[in-house]
Amino acid sequence: MSLGHATPATGELSTARRAVQPVRRHQLFHQPSRTAFWIWGSAVMAALGIVWFGVTALEFANPYFLPSPGAVWTAGYEMASTGQLWADTSESMRRIVIGFLISTALALPIGLLMGSVGRFEAALEPFIDFVRYMPAVAFVPLTIVWFGVDEGQKYSIIFIGTFFQQALMIMDNVKRTPLDYVRVGETLGLGTTKLLRRIVLPSSGPAIWDTLRISFGWAWTWLVVAELVAARDGLGQRIVVSQRYFDTDRIFFLIGLIGVIGLVLDQLFKIAGRALFRWSSTERG
Amino acid sequence: MSLGHATPATGELSTARRAVQPVRRHQLFHQPSRTAFWIWGSAVMAALGIVWFGVTALEFANPYFLPSPGAVWTAGYEMASTGQLWADTSESMRRIVIGFLISTALALPIGLLMGSVGRFEAALEPFIDFVRYMPAVAFVPLTIVWFGVDEGQKYSIIFIGTFFQQALMIMDNVKRTPLDYVRVGETLGLGTTKLLRRIVLPSSGPAIWDTLRISFGWAWTWLVVAELVAARDGLGQRIVVSQRYFDTDRIFFLIGLIGVIGLVLDQLFKIAGRALFRWSSTERG
Amino acid sequence: MSAVRIVNVTKTYTTRSGRTQALSPINVSFRPDEFTAILGTSGCGKSTLLHIVAGLEQPSTGHIEVNGTAVSGPGRDRGMVFQNYTLFPWLTVQQNVEFALRDLPMSRRKRHDQAREYLGLVGMEAFAAAHPSELSGGMRQRVAIARALSYQPRVLLMDEPFGALDAQTRQGMQMLLTRVWEEHRMSVLFVTHDIEEAVCLSDRVIVMSRRPGAIKADLAIDIPRPRGIDTLTSAELNGYKAELLQLIREEADDAQTAASAKRAG
Amino acid sequence: MSAVRIVNVTKTYTTRSGRTQALSPINVSFRPDEFTAILGTSGCGKSTLLHIVAGLEQPSTGHIEVNGTAVSGPGRDRGMVFQNYTLFPWLTVQQNVEFALRDLPMSRRKRHDQAREYLGLVGMEAFAAAHPSELSGGMRQRVAIARALSYQPRVLLMDEPFGALDAQTRQGMQMLLTRVWEEHRMSVLFVTHDIEEAVCLSDRVIVMSRRPGAIKADLAIDIPRPRGIDTLTSAELNGYKAELLQLIREEADDAQTAASAKRAG
Amino acid sequence: NSDVPSSSGDANPARVSMGTQAWIGYGPWHIVKEKGFDKNHGIDLDLVNFNTDADLSSAFAAGRLQAGNAATNTVAQFLKAGQPRTIVLFEDTSRTADAILARPDIRSVADLRGKKVAFEEGTTSDILLRHALSTAGLGMDDIKVVPTPASDAGSALISGGVDAAVTYEPYISALRRQDSEVAPIFTAGDKPGLISDTLTVNTEWAKKNPAVVSDLLLAWNDAVMYYREHKQEAQAIIAKGVGVDVADLTTSFDGVDFYDLQQSNTYLTKEFPETASVIEKVLSSTADESASGVSIAGAVDTSYGAKAGGAN
Ligand SMILES: Nc1ncnc2c1ncn2[C@@H]1O[C@H](COP(=O)(O)OP(=O)(O)OP(=O)(O)O)[C@@H](O)[C@H]1O
Ligand SMILES: Nc1ncnc2c1ncn2[C@@H]1O[C@H](COP(=O)(O)OP(=O)(O)OP(=O)(O)O)[C@@H](O)[C@H]1O
Ligand SMILES: [Mg+2]
Ligand SMILES: [Mg+2]
């Protein structure tokens, strides 16, 4: 940063910022260095891997309960070599992305209005609050009745699982727009639409992006439920099928794969967010 | 509040607080009054109810797709009159509470340590981040293998769906402890344990409570999944059985009931939170 | 004709927890080239008054006139600088100033140049491409002033614009504001609770009593212009300061007594 | 013997974005009953220095001695008052003060009384049962001072304790602190960037240069005690103020030039 | 293995955990519980309800169950997965309780060509569909497969998302009640024995507790006898056990034949090998290596039944 020296700004603001990412003598609230993060993180993962390997190698556990790393890897390799794995992954990815986009396309304007116009909040919050407790799984039969057995039904499950949380979270993000920003716009004579477009939306951009990142993660949770019905490909469907044939090796591999994909996408979201919202330093990590 | 007049404190802090709950001329960011909230909220719910009633009364929709309010009510009444509904509700409630308590009992210390001791965060965050994307639904066969078909298996599903999110959120809550509070403790010579117990924990209390409230809501989502297997009672099991007999009336009633229970518990959590953390005004009203 | 006239204005806030009277009836007017400081303890209603003049809040009774016309909403005839840094963090310094000029009938080129000109006025043209987060507090407030001046409002409302700056930066900013104002002259309403700042900047100091705010004193400041750094340690300033200090302390004592009484009762 | 001796202390922060030298070698000591103000622009390392004395940060080189003994961590011989209100919001005023006395070998009764005594010292006993959120900023800082004094540290470290208060409240607090200190006498290190505050409170003012912080000037303040509200407008104060203003302005100018140069280069 | 209880005299009834599903063919076990036939034979039966074969199998494999009810073809999958199971009882055959249902424009199996069919792969529905298609000279490639759990296949058909659905009772009755236009075009009765159910037990456990297994079979026999003598009460008990009104199930019962112990013994020794080979053939046509190449008949052990039958 070329202006690094100018950053410390006023004591107050910078103290507030530092409180989140402190560098401290005491072991409490000492933010570990990036290297420490990698070392500790990998160490724990490696340790878990070794325990897993050891337990299965010494045959402490029935391989049906806990398959060995080798077996899991082989199962994955087999699926990959037939091209099935790739087809499943891309199919699931497509479903999640579309379901997520539909949800976002609706949640964004609704959340924006709910967060900024009191009457919208009053009108919609009770309803959304009510619906969001309803278990998405229970909607499966209804979605079949309503949307049939094609892709629409799958999107609808992902939508039901995602939309209501998204709308509430975006509402919250928007509410945190500093009122003074809006006031500046008002003194310039901007009307409601321009205030929303030019000030409220960009101001809550980083927080909304974070909401999208988190809710995209949740969308994966609904994949298996979405693919229960009438799916020929897809990681969720593959898990269901493997379940039927008691293929724990595959289940392990597939669940792990979903975990890895989730982790990678999360990082991509974070990187994209940092690039998009360079001006914002509020993001963690 | 007997000291009301003393509250406005310094301009700065109170401005910050006001930004969240502003009272404004402009329609933007104008917090609606409690009455307006009730009126608008009920109006929307009532309108949806009337549309529902109208559509079914005029037989626009196949009652199997969309049963009439009357049919849903009758279905509910029947279940209630045999005492079955009450048995199901209390059974589900018990499962959720126990699963949630197990999860919380583990997430609380782990989140506390991850949020305050950098090495814990470094060690556990990657692992938890990895696991939390894995769809809880996919774990059903594994939980049967690991925990059998008794109640333990049901708790384990609720645990898997709740714990990882909880741990990460509590970590985040704890991280927001103002560093200066900890510094005060340090100048008084307190060691790590006392700092955690006397300062970090009470300071992040309201935020942790909020996390518990939200994650308790999520636990309901997993109920149907948890009760898929070997359950004799429970709202989730009842939904599964109704699904089997295409009993849309019952499904509607049960999903609605879960929504209402969720809403009520959420309010109870909020009320309890306000009573427990009277000193905190950061909670949304 | 007055630049701003405040007629019989009162303000009562109604919130969920009750009603707060923030202002008792206020009547006062400001000349077009007058620099007025408004002084008062925290919570006495200074911001409320300024927001009413800006049109950001509606008065409960009474009204505001700007250049002889009653106004009821915000408008470009009144510019405002806030206490907290209100630059938009997602825009560069240049874009922040241009933001105020959008929607005006002028070419892109003209808008760019005009923004650059006002950045020059506050000595910030070198930072046109920087984002607010790269600037210190003082630099940010300089840009905020440039933004408020750029569309040439007749009245400039400043709500503790230097309140969050450290003492040294604050002095620099006071000198800068004095210089700019002495060149451009307009009606300024400057809210502060720093007595020295009030005296050293203005032609007139209005002291407000504590809540519900009312005008307690209205003092002309006869320190010759142009003013400079020496004004800060001049004997005249010290005289006004002692006088205002006395006025303010009466207020503070009242408040203290009231608080203790309420507590005990 | 000095209450506090700072020996060859430097501090360099290493963060993910690089290394920042906050302090160049500092050598200075403070007498047991001396009230010292530390003055400097924002970011010059005042808080860093205070935290090192408090034992909250480790110096990169050098060490600290308290009453002739080297110390390396925090301890009850040094009390601290922070800029932002650091009362625990979940405890009442009384409990906040008692918090500092827990773990000490005294009865509940004694602890209660001692806390109440110090609340009385700062005029807050009437609010013992209130929660911090019910108090104004000035009231909160009074309780924080009571808390820091209650366990009778030999050294009191104050990091811009009045920085967030409005000017009027601030004056009241300065008077309060002066009164308490003149009664109880101890070594005080008082960080501020308000020149007037520094002069009016202390026996000695240390001016720090901008980053990496070093001691630029060390000035004895010979204004007789007890001091009162008139000290604020006294001629002596004005003299010291002009002198310090000059010193500080050199610093500020340097910074301004450096910033512009860096930007252009 | 501590999970496996042993028969330790009549004073202390041997506990047997048995996995079951909401299929009326397993209904007599509910009669066993309700009427206390288990206690009469010195055992304590614990019926554990599952929604899918997969979940039941997981529990079985984990040693949580000593016995499990399953369709004969499902047993092949269990065996293929290496689970130590022994078939000890032939419980029932389905006649009209498994069926291919279709909209009115489809009148025969041959009409399914190019149509969307919803069914759950690897289940009895899969077997039935494959067999039906082969009778019409079709294969799976001639239809559009829509993999759907049996519980949802009906919904898929009603919603118009598919042209035909393969499912079983009680879904069939429920479905026809909802939509009277839907009619069966092929039922299990068209190939008797194809869709049938057996009781399997954990092989190891059975070897250690032969008496308990025999007692279990006797309890089943009592229940079937009771069913035959008190049809209405028996059906009410079963309906309650699977969670529906008896009125909703009456037609379903007509589609199922229960086998008593003697019938079972006979069937298992005489006809079962042939039935098994038909199933194996159909399974091998799935080209799903998870269920091919096993011998179902090889898993049968009639000794427990014979012993119980002899003692009877
Ligand atoms: N924990 C930290 N990690 C990294 N750099 C730090 C840290 N604390 C302070 N610094 C840097 O050290 C320098 C001195 O900071 P310090 O807070 O001591 O200044 P200060 O004089 O107290 O300023 P202010 O008046 O704004 O409070 C600054 O450049 C700051 O950015
Ligand atoms: N939006 C609002 N809703 C309710 N009460 C308000 C609102 N804004 C201000 N008040 C109350 O009105 C009174 C005056 O507030 P105002 O912000 O005008 O004071 P101020 O003089 O600007 O104080 P400060 O110096 O702290 O900025 C205060 O008691 C405050 O609590
Ligand atoms: Mg104000
Ligand atoms: Mg500092």
Image (tube, coloured by chain):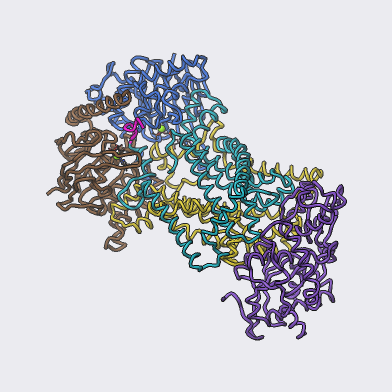
Chain colours: A cyan, B yellow, C blue, D brown, E purple
- From the viewer's side, name the closer residue of C46 and E43: E43
Left or right side of B262 for C223: left
Residue E278 or residue E33, whichever sits in front: E278
Q: Give the quarter of the image for residue C34.
A: top left
Going by the image, does C57 lie left or right of D249? right
Name which quarter of the figure residue B13 lies in: top left
Rendered location of residue B177, percent (x, y): 40, 49
Let me know if residue A3 is in the magenta part. Answer: yes
| Residues in magenta, as a range | A1-10
Find residue C217 and report its horizontal and vertical position in percent.
35, 26
From this viewpoint, is residue B261 visible?
yes
Whether residue C257 can be seen here: no
Residue D49 included in the magenta stretch of the image:
no
Magenta span dominant secondary structure: loop
Q: Residue at x 46, y 51 (%)?
A: B126
Depth order, front residue of E266/C22: E266
Question: Regarding ligand 4, which quadrant of the image does it lie in?
Answer: top left
